[in-house]
Every structure is written in C-alpha cells, then in structure tokens.
Amino acid sequence: MNVQATTTVVTELESDAMVAGIFTDGILGSNLADLNAAVGGAVTRLVERRDITGKAAEVVRVLSPSGLQAGELVIVGLGDRAAFGQAQALQAAGAAAKQLAGRPRNRIAYCLDGDWDDAVTSAAVCGAVTGCHGQDLYRSERKLHVFGEILWSTGSPQAIAEGVVLGECINLTRRLVNEPPSMMTPVRFAEEAAGLATTFGLDIDVWDERRLHDERCGALLSVARGSAHPPRLVTLRYQGAADDEPAIALVGKGVTFDSGGYSLKPTDAMKTMKCDMAGAATVLGALVAVARLSLPVNVHGYVGLVENMVSGDAYKLGDVLTSRRGKTIEVLNTDAEGRLVLADVLDVAVSQGAHRIIDLATLTGACVVALGTDVAGVMTNDQAWCDELIAAAQVCGEPVWQLPMFAEYAEQIKSDVADLKNIGDGRWGGAITAAKFLEQFVGDRPWVHVDIAGPSFAEKPKPWLDAGGTGCLLRTLLQLLRMRS
Ligand SMILES: [Zn+2]
C-alpha cells in the first residue's frame, strides 16, 4: 500500500480526509492546534461541548471544514495519555481508517500529534493499513475500500516504511485465513508460499505426500488421509545473520479445513474452521516481514498443511499412529488433529537444527474457555525463552497469558496401548494437556507453544479491524526477533 511521508504544513495538505488525534485530557497537540486555528476554533468548541472526548478509538468527523484543503477533518480518540502505546496508536489509526474506508477514497492524510518513538509510529501506520482492508474478498460491492494513498505527516520515513511492511504482512496473513477453505487448500497454500519466497528471497522446500512418506511423517499423513487434497510441509529459510548463527524456528499449524474427522464438529463449531490454518498463515506472514525488513537474524518457518476430513479411508478412533520421532500415538479423538500434525512438524524442525522454537496454533477450544477470545495462551519448557516472548507481546500491546505445565498434566496423555494418546481425560485443562503432548516432540530445545484459537479469528468486527482473520501476534514475533538481533 502506498504510504508517503510528507513535510507539507498540515493546513495546506490536499486530501479526501485528514486524521488528527486527541487524548482524553483535551489538550491539542501542535498539528491539531494548527488545524483548529484554520477551521476557526471548531475543534475547541467540539471539545468544550463534549462532542469530542478523546476516548480510545472514538471517531468524530467534521465534514467540509472551511479553511482546509480536505473533504473532512476526522478527530480520533487516543485515550488516556498515560496508557498510550503501540496498541492504542494502532487502534486509533485503524478506527479512523475503517470508518473512512466505507467509500472509495483517493488520499487520506494522517496528521497525528506527538513525538512518538518509531515503534509507536509504525504501529499507527500498521493500523491504518490494516483498518481499510476487509474480509469482503468475494462481495461485488465491497464494504471497505482500500485507500489510493496515505500521506503521513509525523515520524521518520523509516518508521513509516516499517509500519507499512507490518500492515501488509498482517493483511497477507488475514487474506490467507479469510479465503474459503476449498480455495485455500494445502497445495494452494504451498503455492502462495513459493510465490512469496521467490518475490522476497526466501529459501523454500515443499514436501509432497511422497516425500512426507519417505520422511516417516506418519502422524501428519494419518490426519491428511481422509481428504481428497494432499498434504504439504513447507519449510522457509531466511538467513539474515552468519550461516553458523543459530536459527529460530517458527512452526505453524496449517489445517486448511477442520471438519473434526469422525469426531465430527457440529455446524456452529465447524463454520469458521477455514481459520484452522491461522498459525501457518502467521508464520508465512512473519517470514515475509523478516525478509522485507532485512532483520539480522536466522529464522526458519515450518508449516504443516493438511485438511481434516471424513472418507472411507479417514483415520479412526482407536487407530495407533507412528510419529516421525518414533513415538506411537493412540487416536481417541480425530478432532485433536492439530497436535498430530505439529508432532511431526516440530520433529522436522528439531532434526534440522532449530535452536529455539515457537509454535503458533489454533489448537484448543479449551484455551478459549480459559482466556476468552482476545488472549493467546502461552506454554513452555523454558521460562527464559517464554519471558522473551511475553516481553515482546507487552511492548506491542498484544495480550498473552501463560498457563502452567506441571508434570501432573502429562499423566493424562499416557495410553494403555501406545506411548501417548491424543486427548486428555475429559475436558479439563485441555489447552495444557495439548501442550504437554507437543512437548514430547521438541526434545531439549527451548520452546514456546502459543495457542491462538481465540484471538486469530474474530467473529465480530472491532472498531479498528474488520471481522475474520486478525494476524494477531505477527507484530510480537517481529518485536521478539528484533530484540534478539
Ligand atoms: Zn480439530
């Protein structure tokens, strides 16, 4: 998306709409003060009448303001000045963008105030880029119209450019999630990854079903067996540091549609299951972002792509699978398929020398029961590594919450007929028993499991972002990699 830094005086900027911000304390920053003077004090009057409160993501539109070269002046609330950070900047810029995108616009000028640090400016730009993109991929009449261009009047050109990359990569992740499941099959996802790898200079390896068989990925292949669409395992490599520097592996669950298999989901639970590849889409978006920003780190992405369906040959309850690592797994619920896919993908990452691992997966409904729809659950075998991820998430204002990994939980995944079973006893602690299962496949590597079943897909829109795929935690991953570089 075209976002340009501008040094033109705000009162002389020509645009369809200008966006300025105000905190709840009502104090006008220098841009807004200039705009207010140009429109004869109209903003001050709106503040005095409490039509503008500065409340977070509040959007007040002044149409055809006299004295400005703009079709409208939009005042967006920045919330409490003391609580302001990346998330608030993103949400404010996004809320203005989402409202303005209701009809086609050529040029929007953002004239937000404040000497924000670069990361906050980037987050705001990111919010503007994501806010005007919707999930309406197949509507003849779009609900949201992407702006022709954005002019940005504050912050360094570098911070603005970085915000564009973050926003575009989040939009990439969102689009992959929002595509219908019969469109975004494992093969199609792998093709998208190959195209992006070529464009942005990533090494890529795509394993087809024959190679997966040769590599003994028995758990992943069992899940895939019920589908007419063959599975894929995609490896992406970005080498931004010396070749002998250790690599961080990002591992994503890519179940392109999850019917539940013979443990069939009811309609209400199945209707959004195109989003069960959000982990894979986030890993791909993050690898593209790392490459575009040329971060000096080595990052490898591993995504396991399957469709979980029913057919005469689909895997069954009571089946025993042999994973790539050699551990046998009794299947007692075919809807607990994500951990089976990840078991083999994690093992591939470990055997290819991943130094540290983060996996992202829409893994359990239990995590949503525990933490709600806006918070990701994190679980780990290495507290220091987990603390790094949590710190990055806090900087970005993306909510995550750690769940415990006590040994007692692992008792529940012991099987009487195989090494493991793929589901705990009953429904209690299901997010954690799933993580204890994954832990069996990461060896001694520092590993954080991120369950994004809640926040990766929004059934309802937010003021700053349309419903559908959210691209959650992509900014956090980039922040984490930057902190390590
Ligand atoms: Zn499932």
Image (tube, helix red, strand yellow):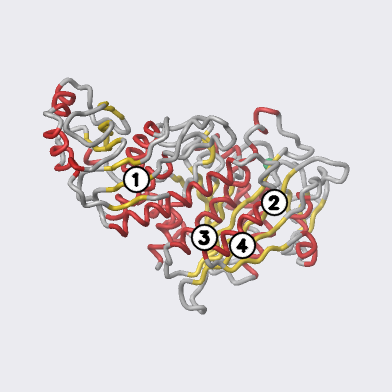
Q: Amino acid at mark 2?
A: Pro
Residue 268, placed above or below residue 300: above
* Percent position of residue 395, x then y: 35, 51
Q: Is residue 272 left or right of residue 67?
A: right
Question: Which SS class for mark 2?
Answer: helix
For disc 1, the neighbor class at 10 Å (few under 14, some 14 to 19, many from 20) is many
Q: Amino acid at mark 3?
A: Leu
Residue matched to label 3:
287
Closer to the observer: label 3 or label 1?
Answer: 1
Residue matched to label 4:
442
Q: What number is the disc on residue 186? A: 2
Question: Which SS class for mark 4?
Answer: loop
Labels 3 and 1: the sequence-earlier one: 1
Cβ–Cβ under 8 Å for marks 3 and 1: no
Q: Amino acid at mark 4?
A: Val
For disc 4, the neighbor class at 10 Å (few under 14, some 14 to 19, many from 20) is many
Between the residue at mark 4 and the residue at mark 3, the CA separation in whole angstroms equals 21 Å
Residue matched to label 1:
150
For disc 3, the neighbor class at 10 Å (few under 14, some 14 to 19, many from 20) is many
Labels 3 and 2: the sequence-earlier one: 2
Q: Please tell me in which quadrant of the rendered image residue 207 appears.
A: bottom right
